[in-house]
Image: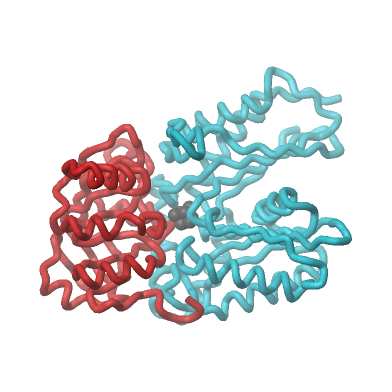
Amino acid sequence: MKRLNLPLTEEDLRDLHAGDAVLLSGEIYTARDAAHKRMHECIEKNEPLPFDIQNALIYYVGPTPATQGRAIGSAGPTTSSRMDPYVRELLEKGLGGMIGKGRRSRDVKDAVKEHKAIYFVAVGGAGALLSKSIVKREPVAYEDLLAEAITKLTAKDFPCFVGLDIYGNDIYDHGEL
Amino acid sequence: MKEIDVKRIGDKTEELFGKIAYHYPAGIMDAIRQAHQQEDNPRGKNVFDMLEENARIAIEEHIPICQDTGMAVVWLSIGQDVHLTGGDVNEAIHEAVGRSYTANALRASVVDDPLFERKNTKNNTPALIHTRIVPGEEVTIEVMAKGFGSENKSQLKMLTPAMGVEGVKEFVLDTVKKAGPDACPPYVIGIGIGGDFESCAEMSKAALLRETENADTRYSQLEKELLEKINTLDIGPMGYGGKATALKVMVEYAPTHIAGLPCAVNICCHVCRHAKAVIQ
Ligand code: SF4
């Protein structure tokens, strides 16, 4: 189990291989379907993105509402492939990586390798457990999207696995997949 | 004739949705523990450790098992000797779902229009309600909170009679392979065979509710065989590899047309949330 601080350095990335278990600490942005659509519209209109995307990590999550005394409600990953059409342009703008679950398209795999980015996968349906590693959540943009709004999380030892590494390896390359 | 106030149906519905977001059904939890014991892939075992820990935290700290607290599906079996009083039963259920999702801090995951505005309705309504008229004078409520990561991987195919049992097996395995790691395996798989296009799809979802063995030995044998085959695919827990690609396979069947063999596969993740109550 590797403990890593965000943002990741080039050296960190060189050391990570698909399948490695890691614990991430630092800032992570949340965004899923509707927020990606809006970011795509920003890019098309040449408008600035709602947060500094340089080396940022986006977590595909739409949490349940936080109850009293908690930073966040249940907060596990959603299926990443729905965000595939938006990944290349975000990587081109400087995105450092993503956290989600499930396979990515050929194009995303290539783009992750080309941009020396990273894709982590977290355990789906373990939202209660994963929420315990998120100590803070701040609003950033698109609050009208409710659970789909962009927010900034502060993670402490967030458990996940390397899904795609800079060498082009994929955690899902086995069996009948 | 027995009178039942729709408010009682609403209150029970509200209670059940509040419960299933935090508690796995006993049968699913048992299946998870059993599959954990049989799993020998280290990464698969690691996933099971996390799922069991997650289930414990969900109950003890009252945090939903999964953040996708689903679309609310309700099956109402209404005894034909029941007279429902106190208002519109459908309204009572929609309102109950709204109350439950708000009061229990569950996620609002429903949009009003599927194609254009896609505006969130803010309280997870409307619910999807299936009603059946049955003999007797009680009302049975079965609820399910269906996540869409797995719903998205479900499929229906109009097979032809000549394709037979082999065709069904092939279609089921193909659907599971296509779902692959994306819909949070280990899966619970509901299968509908027969009927017509839409009743077959509904059967495949209702199959997920079953808590007992299939009473028909031919079909229970088919379930066993399918489960064994699925668990040789090496998709494994979360698709990280291992034996446990599915926890259960459950088949429902119905008479169909001489020209047809409809088959629907409803993929459900390990968070197969459902519960049942009877109102007398
Ligand atoms: S597929 Fe199931 S476990 Fe996975 S995110 Fe959706 S509801 Fe949760």
> Chain in red?
A
Q: Position of residue B93 (x, y in %)?
A: 61, 30
Q: Is residue B163 left or right of residue B147?
A: right
Q: Is residue B151 left or right of residue A2?
A: right
The chain letter corresponding to cyan is B
Residue A101 image point, x, y percent? 38, 62
Relative to the observer, which residue lies in front, A161 or B178?
B178
Hey, which quadrant is residue B222 in on the image?
bottom right
* Vertical relation: B131 (above or below) A58: above
Front residue of A171/A23: it is A171
Q: Is residue B7 depicted above or below B60 in this figure? A: above
Tell me the quadrant of the picture where the C terminus of chain B can be found. top right
> In x, y percent, where is residue B227?
64, 73
At 52% from the left and 65% from the top, the residue drawn is: B179
- Residue B26 in view in this figure: yes
Seen at 26% across and 45% down, the residue is A39
Q: Quadrant of residue B76?
A: top right
